[in-house]
């Protein structure tokens, strides 16, 4: 048996010793005496303390000691020490958007998993898989969230602490495609907290037309649209690609019926997937974007309401906007806003300086559709300013689904793998919030002892009172005699 | 009879020791039955004092006829009159006098003082009476001049067991009805304020009042062992006498004794303290009976 918080046990032992000591100290009144001038004695406390050879109230003392020890043992969280195996694994399973091939993920984990191992599923957050692991593994599906290896490693450390009593050595296994976006600045530091080497199981995602994400940037706009100039300048940027729709594509060219076009272009109505698909097909027929292309479609209407956005109650101005590391400082006439419910399933890719979303991205098939609510002024040199060109290039970077498939730098992966052997169990701190099955029983025992102590103490008080009454009546009789 | 003999034997040595002591009045007494004390009246005793011219109404037999024959003038022969001084002794027999409980030394000393003062007064030819303030009903011995009065006093104090917590002032008032000298033997732990009031009134009326304060050494300097002490006259008063409180107790009791002595002396009462075991009873009696301005020597 081990105690998870042994300090409480030692404290209870100290308190029990103090109780025993107190029972050896007898508090009593001094001997009674007659003094006619007693009125001149100051009225103070009338008890003296003297040591006794035998403890007073032995039963009461035992009850109190047991009560304290039971409560202390309960707080110390005793656990029966389980039998330890030689080795256990903490398996980190990537279920983020980078891990497209869920079948491969599941197969890999099943091949590794043994009874007693801890499985941690992670995307942007990590959680330990509890219950029936086999069933949970079968239900694992990749999410749309970006993976975060740092969060997964921190959870792995906690899982390692929970496994320290089951195995002498712990192994860290990471099943993931190891995309670049899953690493962040803290990953290396957090990884160093896990002692020893990690086993990496790389799962490769399905083949994707990633090259389309790097296609040249196009714009569908009126001839005098000032953004066309910016797009021409942004084409020189390597990452810029996709199509910027300024709302100038004729409905006929989109391959839509007049009714569908009317429905799709109805003002202030968010277009549904059907109309968006129609729009994409229209562009595909036009030859701008290949069908099922991974390049982003950037809906940046010049006049009308952007997709997912609503009219602001009051138009205002804002002093800047940023997307990634591109920042544009200027005065923008802000007319649209993205309500919070419109952001469900979407990712904000540009924000105003006050934090409001300025552009959002929603996945669409293997690509994505972006909605931009940033006005472009034709006045001055705004559209040819370098920072605005960078901003447009940042807006037209490949879709997140594409970047999620970009593999990480081999050096980062090598750091993640680390060196050395398996992690010893002693390297992990025991969990302070571990569950103790014995603690509730000990607390119940303590409560029972407290009740018993109450009754015993009351009985002792009654006995003392009776004895005093007997003494006083005897003395009265003697006085009367 | 054997018990009575024991009682008298107990006081025999004391009575022998005080046999020669005289107890003069502190001031001239009223006239009356001829006695040992100087009277305020000019009488016809053999002790000549002065002549006074005869006035109408004087008894003719008091005219000094020899002087009349020589001087042809009628003079009255005056002399100092002597009178008795009835003495009433009031003994406090309350519960506080039964201390220490093992020996009742305070009461024993008070009884010795009462018997001795009674004997001294009786030897001076004065009538002696006794009031024992014991409980609600005091024991009263009216002042008498007969020889057996000392035996009566001995018998009365021997039969008394101190107890109760009744006030002493009513007993003093009863004793004061007999006139003459009044002796109060008490520890003043009862109704000291009322007692002072009664005594002051008597002194103002020209009475000779003595107060003997009986104190046990255990009261002045109690044992150092911690004890829960209680007042025998007020059992609700229970205090812890420990090393912490002892010093304050001693100081408070001393201050109270000083205040009692000061108050009674200021009221004109002949105040004396009698500490158990501090001096021999005859020396104590000489100190009490010494005339004003004199102190007894050991």
Image (cartoon, coloured by chain):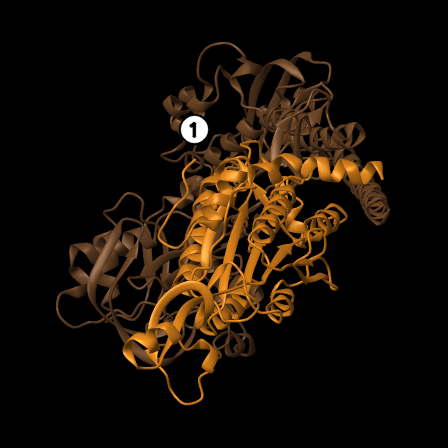
Q: Secondary structure at mark 1?
A: helix
- Give whichever of A471, A287 is nearer the camera: A471
- Would residue B14 appear left or right of B38 to someone viewing this image? right
Q: Residue at x 26, y 57 (%)?
A: A231
Q: Is residue B29 above or below residue B284?
A: below
Q: Colour of chain B?
A: orange
- Please tell me in which quadrant of the rendered image residue B267 appears: bottom left
Disc 1: host chain? A
Report which residue position mark 1 lands on. A190
Q: Nearer the viewer, residue A320 or B57?
A: B57
Find chain A in the image and tell me its colour.
brown
User: B75 or A394, which is in the foreground?
Assistant: B75
Image coordinates of residue B157 in percent, x first then y, are: 71, 49
Please give the name of the residue rendered at 48% of the width and 30% of the height, measured from the top-left corner. A178
The residue at the far front in this view is B69
Please indicate whether residue A52 sits to the left or right of residue B252 in the image. Answer: right
Is residue A342 visible to the viewer in this orientation of the structure?
Answer: no
């Amino acid at each position: 048996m081990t105690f998870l918080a042994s300090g409480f046990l030692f404290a209870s032992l100290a308190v029990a010793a103090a109780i025993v000591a107190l029972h050896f100290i007898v508090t009593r009144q001094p001997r009674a005496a007659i003094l006619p001038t007693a009125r001149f004695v100051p009225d103070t406390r009338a008890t003296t303390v003297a040591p006794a050879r035998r403890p007073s109230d032995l039963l009461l003392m035992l009850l109190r000691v047991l009560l304290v020890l039971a409560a202390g043992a309960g707080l110390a969280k005793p656990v029966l020490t389980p039998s330890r195996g030689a080795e256990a694994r903490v398996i980190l399973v990537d279920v983020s958007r980078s891990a497209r091939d869920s079948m491969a993920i599941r197969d890999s984990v099943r091949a590794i998993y043994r009874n007693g191992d801890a499985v941690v599923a992670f995307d942007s957050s990590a959680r330990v898989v509890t219950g029936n692991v086999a069933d949970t593994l079968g239900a694992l599906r990749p999410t749309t969230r970006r993976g975060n290896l740092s969060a997964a490693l921190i959870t792995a450390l906690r899982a390692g602490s929970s496994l320290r009593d089951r195995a002498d050595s712990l192994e860290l296994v990471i099943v993931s495609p190891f995309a670049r976006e899953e690493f962040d600045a803290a990953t290396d530091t957090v990884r160093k907290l896990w002692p020893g080497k990690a086993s990496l199981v790389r799962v490769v995602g399905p083949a994707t037309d990633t090259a389309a994400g790097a296609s040249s940037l196009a714009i569908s706009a009126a001839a005098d649209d000032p953004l066309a100039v910016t797009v021409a300048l942004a084409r020189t940027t390597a990452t810029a690609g996709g199509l910027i729709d300024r709302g100038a594509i004729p409905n006929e060219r989109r391959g839509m019926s007049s009714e569908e076009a009317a429905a799709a272009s109805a003002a202030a109505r968010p277009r549904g997937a059907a109309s968006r698909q129609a729009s994409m097909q229209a562009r595909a027929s036009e030859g701008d974007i290949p069908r099922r292309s991974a390049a982003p479609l950037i809906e940046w209407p010049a006049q009308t309401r952007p997709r997912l956005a609503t009219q602001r109650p009051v138009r205002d101005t804002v002093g800047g906007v940023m997307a990634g590391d591109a920042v544009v400082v200027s005065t923008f006439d802000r007319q649209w806003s993205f309500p919070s419910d419109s952001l469900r399933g979407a990712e904000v890719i540009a924000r105003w300086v006050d934090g409001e979303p300025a552009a959002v991205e929603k996945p669409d098939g293997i690509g994505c559709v972006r909605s931009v609510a940033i006005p472009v002024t034709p006045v001055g040199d705004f559209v040819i300013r370098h920072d605005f060109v960078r901003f447009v290039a940042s807006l037209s970077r490949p879709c997140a689904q594409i970047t999620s498939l970009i593999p990480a730098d081999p050096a980062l992966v090598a750091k993640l793998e680390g060196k050395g052997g398996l992690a010893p169990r002693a390297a992990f701190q025991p969990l302070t919030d571990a569950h103790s099955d014995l603690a509730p029983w000990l607390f119940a025992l303590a409560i029972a002892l407290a009740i018993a102590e109450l009754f015993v103490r009351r009985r002792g008080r009654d006995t003392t009172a009776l004895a005093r009454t007997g003494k006083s009546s005897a003395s009265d009789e003697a006085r009367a005699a | 009879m054997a018990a009575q003999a024991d009682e008298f034997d107990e006081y025999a040595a004391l009575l022998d020791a005080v046999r020669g002591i005289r107890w003069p009045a502190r001031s001239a007494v009223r006239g009356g039955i001829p006695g040992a004390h100087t009277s305020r009246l000019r009488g016809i005793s053999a002790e000549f004092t002065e002549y006074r011219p005869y006035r109408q109404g004087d008894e003719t037999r008091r005219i000094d006829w020899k002087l009349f024959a020589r001087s042809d003038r009628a003079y009255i022969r005056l002399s100092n009159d002597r009178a008795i001084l009835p003495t009433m002794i009031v003994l406090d027999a309350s519960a506080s006098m039964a201390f220490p409980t093992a020996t009742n030394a305070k009461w024993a000393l008070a009884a010795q003082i009462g018997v001795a003062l009674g004997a001294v007064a009786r030897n001076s030819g004065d009538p002696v009476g006794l009031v024992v303030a014991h409980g609600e009903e005091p024991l009263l011995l009216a002042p008498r001049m007969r020889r057996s009065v000392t035996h009566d006093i001995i018998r009365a104090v021997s039969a008394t067991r101190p107890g109760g917590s009744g006030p002493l002032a009513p007993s003093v008032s009863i004793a004061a009805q007999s006139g003459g000298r009044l002796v109060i033997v008490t520890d003043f732990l009862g109704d000291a304020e009322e007692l002072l009031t009664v005594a002051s009134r008597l002194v103002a009326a020209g009475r000779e009042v003595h107060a003997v304060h009986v104190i046990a050494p255990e009261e002045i300097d109690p044992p150092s062992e911690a004890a829960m002490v209680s007042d025998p006259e007020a059992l609700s008063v229970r205090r812890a006498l420990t090393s912490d409180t002892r010093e304050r107790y001693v100081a408070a009791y001393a201050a109270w004794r000083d205040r009692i002595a000061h108050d009674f002396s200021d009221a004109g009462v002949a105040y004396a303290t009698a500490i158990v075991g501090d001096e021999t009873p005859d020396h104590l009696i000489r100190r009490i009976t010494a005339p004003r301005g004199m102190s007894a020597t050991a």
